[in-house]
Image (cartoon, helix red, strand yellow):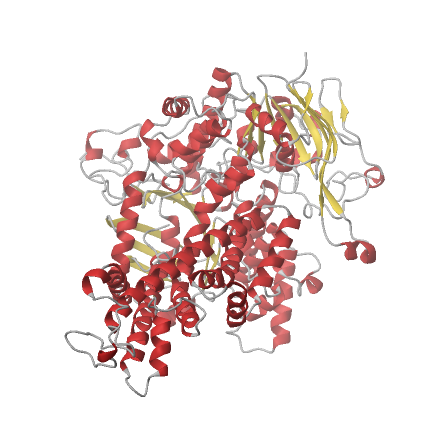
Amino acid sequence: MSAPALAIEHLSVEYATAAGPLHALRDVGIEVAAGEIVGLVGESGCGKSTLIQAILRLLAPNAKITAGRMALAGVDLIGLDPEAMRKLRGDRMSVVFQDPMTALNPVLTIGRQMVDIQYRRREPRAQKRRRAIEMLKRVHIPDPESRFDQYPHEFSGGMRQRIAIAMALMAEPVLFIADEPTTALDATLEVATIELLKALQREIGCAILFVSHHLGVVAELCDRVNVMYAGEVVESGPVRPVFQRPQHPYTQRLLACDPARVHERTRHLPTIPGDLPDLVALPPGCVFADRCPKVFEPCRRAPPPAVKTAELEALRCYLGQPAS
Amino acid sequence: MSAAASTAKPAAARRAKSALRRVLSEPLGLLGSLLVLLAVLGAGFAGFLAPDPIAMAPIDRFLAPSMDHLLGTDNLGRDLFARVLYGGRIALVVSLGATAASLLLGVAAGLVAGYGPPWLDNLLLLIFDALKSFPTVMLALALVTLLGPSEWAVVLVVIVANAPSYARMARTQTMSLRHAQFVEAERSLGAGAGRIIASHILPNIVGPILIVASMDIPVVIAIEAGMSFLGLGVRPPTPSWGTILESGFEYIQDSPWAVIAGGLPIIITTLGFTFLGEALRDTFDPKLATGPR
Amino acid sequence: MNPLLAVENLVVRFPVGSAIGHYFKGEPRSIDAVAGVSLTMEPGETLAVVGESGSGKTTLARAIAGLIPVQEGAVRFEGRPVANLGAAARKALHRQIAMIFQDPVGSLSPRFSVRGLLAEPFRIHGLAARDLDAEVTRLLGLVGLPPAIAERHPHQLSGGQARRVGVARAIALSPKLVIADEPTAGLDVSVQGEVLNLLNELRERLGLSMLIITHNLSILRHIADRMAIMYLGRFVEAGETTAIFAGPRHPYSLALLSANPEPDPDARPRRIALEGEVPSLLARPAGCEFHGRCPFVQARCRQEAPALTAGPDGRLVACHFPLEPAAN
């Protein structure tokens, strides 16, 4: 059995701020098996961006990894020197970000950009060009031969996102990270892009870490999902149990709040009242305790450990655990 | 996004204090601040620190530095140290005043050009570019021919030389903010152009322009000194670093001290303002990361 | 009794390109971002205008709010024409029609405190003599924000808080119509409900009418009585929200409504996949402008543009072959 595409264990990341160390990620564990699509769901402030930056080893200067292990297809990422890390990025792992408008260099044609990023291959230019055009066809860019020499501003947002996906997958990476790739797109484009990702992933066989706050898309696309809140993974498992029988109160509330789920017309949509806790001065107990509708006594004493249950890989909640 | 725990009023004061701390923590910033402080204090307390700068004592001409005359005397026996300090007043007042005037006119014109209708923008651009295309020395000569030499001629030259750049900067920033959503929101509330320009656009663009202006101050000091050196600026017997230099060169065979006395303060203030301006610019660089977002 | 708002055949045109391009290459001189839209709103009603990027919905909102000039057609507010007004009349209109903008934090002037932002409407209209502190506290209370927030600046606010400040500012002078451009954009799912609940509550309490511009169909059901779907600057379908959700008649409406994945892995989406992309406004298709992407296209669609016609139940559809309820 091959090593998982991405294995993160007990990862903690801190930022040095004027007010003290900010604990952006705490004991985060995520695994993406080879060829699997894993979702990462969370709202603003949950630490998704920090996690992606950590995986790419592109954290801000005042951030540091204080604990944990990260490995890409068995290769330890934390101990790697910058040169070796640079070799991995774009080749064995690639990324697509949220904003298609700024993902591409506006002063170069897309063809030039697609050929340039193949710089690692020792091939004649013509062959690189062919591969690039082939990739454009696979992402359904109409008339790729002639559009090859056009500039990014001549494409719509949806097409630019597809070009960005094409560039990321051209190297056939082990791990493809998609950071909210459809958030900025209209609904019809979003579903088209999801279908595209599904098809490409089947062909290329890479593993995908799909980060999104759009629950419906994650449910449709992913095999497994991790739910993050305020820097922790609170629930993690295959999509069916997590979406159909969520155990963590945050996941339950999150799903209940999704207006798409609320079919009956109502004047009072459910919400999660309260705010995120201060990540510099963490509460002593469970990080969700102040906003949790099911909070009880042990929740405020100590943060719940991540426990494996019958259906889930990890659950951080005292409710799901046998009384100690 | 988690709500910040701080409130706004002390936050502004804290930002200013922490900015000051950041500037002073840089070696260049510290040095620059000290030099500028030196120049300002020297000019301010000239009355206490030095004797009369225009008292002539032909007997004591070309004296070397001593306890009575810290920088020696010039060709007319006037105390050079006193002339340097009083000259500092001219330098600082003229340069700061002229810079302030350039900023006022330039930023105002830039705001109007950036926010107003295209025909006004084109007209103002024409004026900016025309003014910028004058070589400074020619401009100085032309103005002095018309107006006669004086501090005001210097101020006018500085304004014509600098205001167009500030205007262009203000114009560009205004044009980029003009379509910002908060501007549109204020328009939707009924705010007129004047209110939007003054309350909503100006405060957001003025920062970088001020920093550029602070880095221009050494240039303005040099313009004043240069014009006075050429006899186009302040008239004798008012001391100016430029006039000190000028008479120093004339009599350089007799004593080097006048040249040193004229050149030294220019070097000190130029370095001081340059270092300070660069430290300020670095301090306000938004790319310094201080947190996850 | 006049409707609160009546829009008749509105056209908003923007110039594009250069004269040279036009004369030598036959490029169009202008695009019609809004290409003939008519709608009415009664007091106390909520109407949603739905569409994707390029549909013209934001332009329509701006035109109704008096922020941009209109080239053809009319906008009547309480019976009075309000398009292309002079500066003074437009300022008076801004007291009646308020707008909430898309970017919660970006629509707040960065150097102003919340107090200053909420006081601006009063100052602008010469009402500064009022007890502004009391007004600010009142407005914050109406939108459920604590009074302490008045001292904060926009960058210190969360998305949800900034959105509420925007709402408070919009209702400051008790307008009759509030236009909300993407009220849930940029907000997390767990706070979207807060904004929608707030808008509903304010509508009832203050007797507001609301025009909601959005591309987020999932929130519509909970806030809008009627809705209109826009494509390339025109309405393709309009009617009661619940009726349209139950049985869309235009193929584009069907595609839009089906393009909303549910957070349930076992939900089998009966999705209508659309071919291609939205056509450019510079090159409008002939006939029905949707024909190039329509899964049910027929010969007539390519030649003849359908008019927006009303059915017996009041539903407006612009399609030669509207879908029957059985087809859904």
Residue closer to the observer: B272 or A1? B272
Residue that extends furthest to the left in the rendered view of this protein: B67
Looking at the image, is A232 positioned above or below residue B142?
above
In this image, B193 relative to B67: left or right? Answer: right
Q: Quadrant of the C terminus of chain A?
A: top left
In this image, C13 relative to C103: left or right? Answer: right
Residue that extends furthest to the bottom in the rendered view of this protein: B253
Looking at the image, is B57 positioned above or below residue C318?
below
Image spot of residue C32 (x, y percent): 73, 41
Which quadrant holds residue C187?
A: top left
Residue closer to the observer: B64 or B5? B64
Which quadrant holds residue C304?
A: top right
Q: Quadrant of the N terminus of chain A?
A: bottom left
In this image, A18 relative to C159: left or right? Answer: left
Residue closer to the observer: C134 or C154? C134
Image spot of residue B130 (x, y percent): 60, 63
Looking at the image, is A232 positioned above or below residue C193?
below
Image spot of residue C130 (x, y percent): 42, 21
On the question of residue C233 being in view, the answer is yes
On the question of residue A15 being in view, the answer is no
Which quadrant holds residue A69?
A: bottom left
In this image, A149 relative to C102: left or right? Answer: right
Image spot of residue C214 (x, y percent): 57, 34
Residue beneath the point at 29% across and 36% down: A288
Residue closer to the observer: B18 or C88? C88
